[in-house]
Amino acid sequence: MAIPIKNERAIAQMRDACAIASTVLYKLRDSVGPGITTYDLDQIGRELIAGLGARSACYGYQVDSRRFPAFTCLSVNEEVVHGIGSLKRVLHDGDIIALDLVVEYEGYIGDNAMTVAVGKISDARAKLLRVTEESLRLGIAQATVGNRIGDISHAVQTHVEKHGFGVVRDMVGHGVGTSMHEEPQIPNFGRRGKGELIKPGMTLAIEPMVNVGSWRTRTLADGWTIVTADSKDSAHFEHTVLTTERGPEVLTLPRLDSPLSIHAV
Ligand code: MF3
Ligand code: CO
């Protein structure tokens, strides 16, 4: 199967979907703090998405016979990704929480995530967040025409492991467009010069998931929440990136010039 190449019209649609995804993500971040439940955060996410005329691509997302029951993915501390908001999960000062926001707008999907501090966090947790975000930035920098997907993977893995952390292997980044998951897969580990050739017009969701300890994970009994096997902390950052002849363009940044922008919410 070939990697979809987006034409000008599809790229414009991706820009809109991604602007909404990032606007909601930044707004949701503003609601994070000690005392709020992850259920409340999910409801805020639901309202923000609806307020911009979009739809959560997570809600009802089907794997085998199971459907994801929440509007956002909220993953606290040792939870890696795909956490489900719960009234029983109250955020405490010192926690970290990954917010993963995927929206569909007029048939196109924007996907982005960030991990944020709840109140004041330990230096160790701050380092995890910093290194994970840096690894995303270094991965994005490799998303240039003529490079290969392995160049992204290698850049992420090298940075993460230099700091003694582990990159999650059983989940990967992905192409994104009219479906949440398109080709290619974008592992956060791999070899330079390997994998698919990067051409202009690809829209790629690059998303390092980084563990303080082992890269191994397991799934909770809810069938969705992925946690670290050793119960140590994990962080996740993600952007949707357009490849162009002029270099990578991050589509999931809040846009100031658009009615979809953060100031219009
Ligand atoms: N960003 C996540 C991913 O690409 C979103 C998953 S939505 C869920 O896999 F429904 F699976 F939770
Ligand atoms: Co994704």
Image: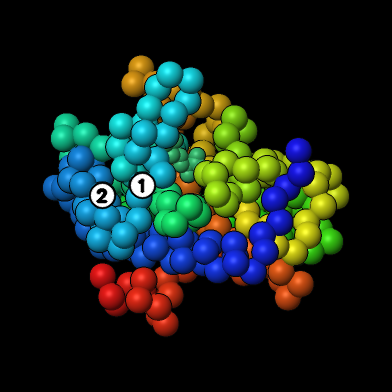
Which of 170/196 is in front?
Answer: 196
Residue 57 in picture, x, y percent from top left: 41, 44
Instruction: Count how many numbered circles sit on residues in the image.
Output: 2
Crowdedness near tag 2: few (<14), some (14–19) or many (≥20) residues, C-alpha within 10 Å: many
Q: Secondary structure at mark 1?
A: strand
Quarter of the image that includes the C terminus: bottom left
Q: Which mark is residue 56?
A: 1
Check disc 2 and give the amino acid type. Answer: Arg
Query: Is residue 165 visible to us here?
Result: no
Q: Which residue lies most toward the bottom here?
A: 257
The quadrant in which residue 182 appears is top right
Q: Nearer the viewer, residue 63 or 178?
A: 178
Q: Quadrant of the N terminus?
A: top right
Examine the rendered structure and indicate whether residue 72 appears above or below residue 27.
above
For image coordinates 53% across by 57% down, the residue present is 239
Of the residues under marks 2 and 1, which one precedes in the sequence? 2
Circle 1 crowding by C-alpha within 10 Å: few under 14, some 14–19, many from 20: many
Residue 162: give x, y in percent of width and height: 66, 49
The amino acid type of the residue labelled 1 equals Ser
Does residue 45 sit above or below 58 in this rendering?
below
Tag shown at residue 46 = 2
Foreground pick, 107 / 100: 107
Task: Please provide percent x and percent y for residue 54.
Answer: 35, 56
Report the residue at 59% width, 30% height from top: 170
